[in-house]
Image: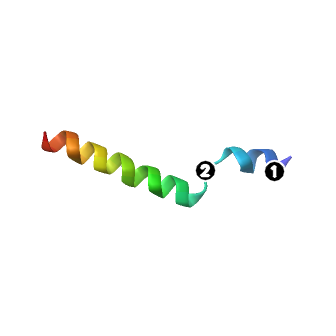
Amino acid sequence: MGTDLQSVLLTKEEIDAKLVELAAKIDAEYAG
């Protein structure tokens, strides 16, 4: 049962990468 949930959740590395990606996008839009 626990393995199903684990496969759905993102790993810490995936979350960190997505945060960096979003931060860069926001910075670019904010800079204009």
Q: Is residue 15 left or right of residue 24?
A: right
Q: Residues within 10 Å of mark 1 (few under 14, many from 20)?
A: few
Q: Is residue 3 left or right of residue 12?
A: right
The residue identified by callout 1 is 3
Q: Residue furthest left?
A: 32
The residue identified by callout 2 is 10
Report which quarter residue 5 is drawn in: top right
**SS at mark 1?**
helix
Q: Is residue 8 left or right of residue 27?
A: right
Q: Residue 12's x, y, as percent? A: 56, 59
Q: Residues within 10 Å of mark 2 (few under 14, many from 20)?
A: few
Who's the residue at 41% across and 51% down the image?
Answer: 19
Who's the residue at 21% across and 39% down the image?
Answer: 29
* Sequence-wise first label, 2 or 1: 1
Q: Residue 16's x, y, as percent? A: 47, 57
Q: Is residue 7 left or right of residue 17?
A: right
Instruction: Name above or below for residue 10 compared with residue 29.
Output: below
Mark 2: amino acid? Leu
Report which quarter residue 32 is drawn in: top left
Mark 1: amino acid? Thr
Q: Residue 14's x, y, as percent? A: 54, 54
**SS at mark 2?**
loop
